[in-house]
Image (spheres, rainbow, N blue to C red):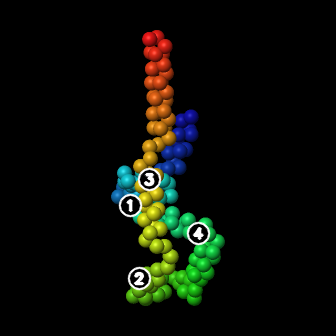
Amino acid sequence: MAGEIDEVRDFFKGSEIQTVPLDDFEAKHKRRKHSDSDSELPEGYSSMDSDEIAETRALAKKMLRKKFRTEAIDASFSRNAFTEAEKDLPTWFVEDEAKHHVPNINLTKEEVDEEKRLLREWNARPSKKVMEAKAKKKMRLAKAMNKIKNKA
């Protein structure tokens, strides 16, 4: 047993242990902290606000129709559809492209407002568990009232 410990000490004798500053480690492995508002949203919507969610839902409803879907896909193809490496392009060109190369999505304000209204209605509804609890309470109360009536 003592011989094995001596062998391990001899193995590590010539090598030095490197220490890494804690600041460097934290900078490399920094994790994004979630705010309270992010935890209320479903998994895929963590970075969206209600306006973006409403737009996404309205667009998804329109994409269910084959005619709109094919028109949107056809409109997405153009001679500018490919992307070049941004490092090869001048910065003024990249900034100008980002400003003016915005996809044209045919959504009206009324469609988005309708989705916002539907989302507000959905969020205003009580949860299923709350509804079940209220129904059980009402049934218990009715049962107790029937007992009292039968005694009287």
N-terminal of the pair, mark 1 or mark 4, is 1
Q: For the residues carrying marks 2 and 1, which lies nearer the camera in this image?
A: 2
Q: Residue at x 49, y 21 (%)?
A: 143
Separation (CA) of disc 2 from disc 1: 32 Å
- Residue position for label 3: 121
Q: Earlier in the sequence, mark 1 or mark 3?
A: 1
Alpha carbons under labels 3 and 2: distance apart: 35 Å
Q: Where residue 99 is drawn, which disc sits there?
A: 2
Amino acid on which the number 4 mark rests in the picture = Met
Q: Is residue 32 above or below residue 151?
A: below
**Residue 69: percent from left, percent from top:** 61, 73
Q: Secondary structure at mark 4?
A: helix
Looking at the image, is mark 2 or mark 4 earlier in the sequence? 4
Closest to the observer, 86 or 52: 52
**How far is disc 1 from disc 3 in space, using C-alphas?**
43 Å
Disc 4: which residue: 63
Residue at x 53%, y 49% (from the top left corner): 11
Specify the amino acid type for callout 3. Glu
| Residue 144 vs residue 120, the one in the foreground | 144
First-in-chain label (4 vs 3):
4
Are the two marked residues, 1 and 3, in contact with CB atoms closer than 8 angstroms?
no
Q: Residues within 10 Å of mark 1 (few under 14, many from 20)?
A: few
Determine the secondary structure under disc 2. Answer: helix
Q: Which residue is the site of mark 1?
A: 27
Which part of the image, by quadrant, shows the N terminus?
A: top right
